[in-house]
Image (spheres, rainbow, N blue to C red):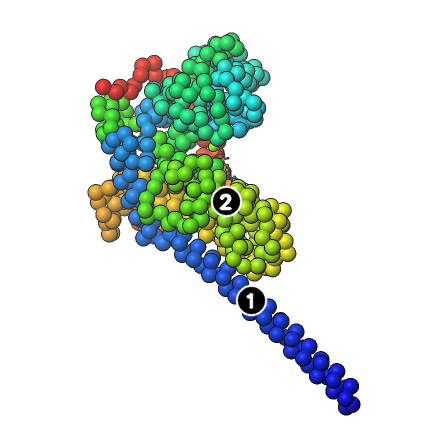
Amino acid sequence: MGKLGLGVAVGCAVASCAIAAVVVGRRVRSRKQWWKVVTAVDEFEEAASTPVGRLRQVVDAMAVEMHAGLASEGGSKLKMLLTFVDNLPDGSENGIYYALHVGGTNFRILRIQLGGQRSILGHDVERKPIPQHLMTSTSEEFFDFIALSLKDFVERKGDNLQFSQVRGKDLGFTFSFPVKQTSVSSGTLIKWTKGFAIEDMVEKDVVECLQKALSRRGLDMNVAALVNDSVGTLAVGHFLDKDTVAAVVIGTGTNACYLERADAVIKCQGLLTTSGGMVINMEWGNFWSSHLPRTSYDIDLDAESQNPNDQGFEKMISGMYLGDIVRRVIRRMSLESGIFGPLSSKLSKRFVLSTPLMAAMHEDDSPDLSEVAKILEETLDIRDIPLKVRKIVVKVCDVVTRRAARLAAAGIVGILKKIGRDGTGGIAGGRIKGIKSGKMRRTVVAVEGGLYTSYTIFREYLNEAVAEILGEDIAPYVILKVMEDGSGIGAAMLAASNSARSVDTVQVL
Ligand code: ADP
Ligand code: MG
């Protein structure tokens, strides 16, 4: 080899060493970054973990807080509101009834025909968007719009014949905003939420406002029941199955209600009901306990929310928030490593990743997780990430959803514990080994809301956790039943069962 040849050979060797060093350096760096990401996910999973022992602590805390909220006004973060619903529909109701459901940007008008013997002969629903400008207008304009829409619906359904029957005129009203109920068919608005701001309505009786609008529009109907969505769900659950004792809504937000003994409502001494019971609206979204597995992502989400220190349980469970928790975890991983490419500005936008999109990534069963790749690209501007990183994203979705579903399950068992339907001795009793299943009564919980009805993995995790907490002796006695559209139909059924009684059956001495 000549001098030139040697020089070239040495030069090549140096160059390839340098390239090798760069490659190795990159590999080491990428391995380090990968390790950081795996550690971040492991830490998150640990902080968000819900072993059955912890869930049982949440069950106990829920039952104790329920008790405290019933003992005194402001005694707990759980408001435990009286609904004045003392009798639930029992299936004997019959006739045609209407209901209105005002709960968010859409409202629904419903018509049901009940045939007695737990039968629903007909059922029509119409959804209508509420025009944006009406959400901040006056109560008169707002309710005029509702009354007109109802009138149009009633006329189209052609129930003129039935209108001669008194029962055909009864209307249920589901109003999913905080209301201080004063009877089963009256209540004042405490405050608006969800973007509504019709100031002249605050502290007014919402039924009175609706009733006046109905008269202005010449609609001779009577608002016989004012309920929130969880109470509506309990009503339809009870209509279909008399063993239904509680209802849970898990949609954009979350709430629960249940049938309580009137004498257990200690804060309302002298509460008399003909049935001896009363449906309690727990407003459980605001539940809090130190046993809840809270992570740094939850703390940040709460601090940046419109209502810090409020609705803590809801922020871990409901559809409004789950996608945003996942976004926060991906953002942290992206900040700490380069595996998601350059930091996307979209990752800093709150609520950019909705829960249905998160669920679609979670449920992606394609071999290369192409749906995950598509959603990351379209929603978060994250492109060309390898399969192992997509798998990490699915893992994060799983951790968030599993925790949410299992905590909701613990909440449900907490209610059962409070009313002595969980197979233990109630609040005072501990867990009894070898329970006699003969002592257990069949117990049904009605469940409504998009997260439970449309997100299969969420539903499966929730069902599984309820069974795990209760144990194999008790679990077969507890049934969770889906009630789609339950809140609206239930209000119509309550209108039916309340119109059947002409006297007020609840007395507060
Ligand atoms: P709302 O609570 O507003 O009355 P729904 O009960 O229909 O409405 O629930 C809607 C919520 O449920 C959405 O905000 C969304 O978070 C969640 N959701 C709906 N569909 C799905 C889905 N396929 N996967 C996951 N979450 C869903
Ligand atoms: Mg709803």
- Looking at the image, residue 97 sits to the left or right of residue 4; the answer is left
Q: Residue at x 32, y 32 (%)?
A: 79
- Coordinates of residue 8 in the picture (x, y in percent): 75, 82
Queried on whether the Cβ of the residue with tag 2 lies below 8 angstroms from ligand 1, the answer reads no
- Looking at the image, residue 436 sits to the left or right of residue 462; the answer is left
351 up-or-down from 391: above or below = above
Name the image quarter holding residue 263: top left
Name the image quarter holding residue 31: bottom right
- Coordinates of residue 184 in the picture (x, y in percent): 36, 21
Q: How many C-alpha atoms fall within 10 Å of the one at disc 1: few (<14), some, or many (≥20)?
A: some
- Coordinates of residue 16 in the picture (x, y in percent): 67, 77
Single out the residue that lies furthest toward the bottom. 1
Q: Residue at x 56, y 22 (%)?
A: 133
Q: Residue at x 44, y 55 (%)?
A: 44
Residue nearest the observer in this picture, 43 or 423:
43
Residue nearest the observer in this picture, 151 or 254:
254
Q: Disc number at residue 324?
A: 2
Query: Quarter of the image containing the N terminus?
Result: bottom right
Whether residue 440 is visible: yes
Residue nearest the observer in this picture, 441 or 358:
358
- Coordinates of residue 286 in the picture (x, y in percent): 37, 37
Amino acid type at circle 2 is: Asp
What residue does disc 1 label?
Answer: 29
Amino acid type at circle 1 is: Arg
Q: Secondary structure at mark 2?
A: helix
Q: Secondary structure at mark 1?
A: helix
Whether residue 466 is visible: no
